[in-house]
Image: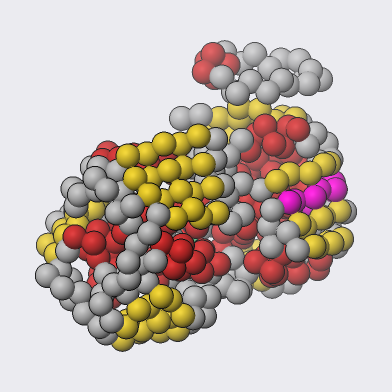
Amino acid sequence: MSRIWVKGGRRLQGEVTVQGSKNAVLPILSAAVLNPGITELEGVPDIADVRVGIEILRSLGAEIEWQGHRLSIDGRGIRPEPVPEELGERMRSSVLFLGPLLARFGEASVCRPGGCAIGKRPVDLHLEGLRQLGAKFDLSEERIHGRAAELKTVQIRLRLPSVGATQQLVMAACGVTGMVTLSGCAREPEVEALCCFLEAVGVAQIRGAGTSRIRILGGGCCRSTRFFVPGDRIAAGTYLAAAAGTGGTLNVQGISPWQLKRTLQLFRRMGCRIQTGEDFIRISGRAREAVPYLATAPYPGFPTDMQSAFLTLAAAAEGKSVLEETIFESRLSLAEELNRMGAGILVCGRRAEIPGGARLHGASVRGSDLRSTSALARAALMAEGESRVEGWEHAERGYESFTEILSELGGMIRKETEKEENSKVLKNETEEPKVLL
Ligand code: UD1
């Protein structure tokens, strides 16, 4: 368990270059299994989930070198070993090793991902699709063991545009000598990034990535490749929201604004000024206006990963806002923690009513998943007084140097050392904290 200390009330100001995308790089690490040559990745974020992904690749026999944000994966020694439980249990997306292992070796064994703080998160669509491709499964409570003598040409229609299931099936389809057509696909930029990577490796020709119908012509010849991981749109949105909450001015570099279209529309609607260029977004002004109704939706809709940002901003906006979470069934637990800071949010099922007008105050709060934990840090930066955010290990799964970045932008925020966790040393409230990491 780790936690951070935050003192609110300062405007964030400056520039940040956004990290490589977590949700793009994790499936790409699984897809590297398909390449028996060398895969070089640039822009790999140094976050806990990536470290788990790398350990999984090593456990399968890959040789890995990781320097700065450059990762080199030598796939020659990869074998279809079972993904170790202690690694699989630490990261839900370890299930994405299933498709590529089946495609390359006809065999795979991964941990069965359970539910998590945001919902049940089943993998039925992954398994249904893989069965249609010709795989057979032995399922136990803990593991999924799959076999496929041969994967076959097929047309698959997804019942839901699941990001994970789309990525899983695209990777598995690379092992088919012939055309696989997927319809009802997720259109998220991270699906597109994966398809670009697979084409760069040469394992498949892919058409329609980024649309709901993707055609994969697999069975290609792999080649050593170098690939740049795109910027993280959710991390970019997170920093923009931090600035919008404190009334600051921030330039986020390394992100294509079109990936954040709905999020930027929201910031504008809440009263922020937004300027964009090919690979930057600049925000200024405080998010003050309430939004009568906002619902999360699959891409290109408003992302579920950004709803925690909205909840936090809406709490302090002028007037009542309503948020409906349509993707994950229990992703509003953040409201309870924000209420400890004075937000007064009412949650009924998947709907949150945010009265607005709150003057958030410091409190001791706990995050239960990646995005809600970072949202609590942002709320604490907006609040009067000191806060402690527990559960910081969730944020470290997906954000690189989060506290250091916000501290450089002027926020009073830092990770607490173990020593401090045992003794409450921060008695002098006016003292400016030093970054200790
Ligand atoms: C991915 C992202 C996550 C993001 C989410 C939605 C990664 C590592 N994670 O998660 O950050 O919040 O997309 O943009 O990229 N579903 C089923 N059966 C399945 C699969 C999904 O019913 O087999 C349902 C889920 O319960 C959920 C919905 O489909 O209600 C969307 O889930 P999905 O798009 O699969 O999310 P993830 O890929 O898990």
Examine the structure image and report whether residue 249 is included in the region drawn in magenta: yes
Q: Is residue 186 above or below residue 416?
A: below
Q: Position of residue 50 (x, y in %)?
A: 44, 44
Residue in the foreground of this view, choosing between 424 and 90:
90
Whether residue 270 is situated above or below residue 245 in the rendered picture = below
Instruction: Answer with left or right where residue 16 lies relative to residue 217.
Output: right
What's the colour scheme?
Answer: secondary structure
Residue 344 visible in the current orientation: no
In the image, is 313 to the left or to the right of 196? right
**Quarter of the image holding residue 53?**
top left
- Between residues 274 and 67, which one lies in front from this camera angle? 67
Tell me what residue is drawn at x 68 percent, y 23 percent.
Answer: 435
Left or right of 338, for residue 227: left
If the image is split into quadrants, where does the C terminus sit?
top right
Residue 402 horizontal/vertical position (percent): 63, 38
Q: Name the residue located 52 percent from the left edge and 18 percent from the top edge.
A: 418
Task: Report the residue at 57% width, 43% height from top.
Answer: 399
**Residue shown at the point (31%, 59%) measured from the top left:** 34
- Magenta region, residue range: 244-253
Percent position (x, y) of residue 274? 83, 61
Residue 374 visible, this orientation? yes
Q: Is 251 inside the magenta-drawn segment?
A: yes
Q: Picture quarter containing residue 151?
A: bottom left
Q: Quadrant of ligand 1?
A: bottom left
Instruction: Give the tally of numbered discs.
Output: 0
Which corner quadrant of the image does residue 234 belong to? bottom right
Q: Nearer the viewer, residue 351 or 398?
A: 398
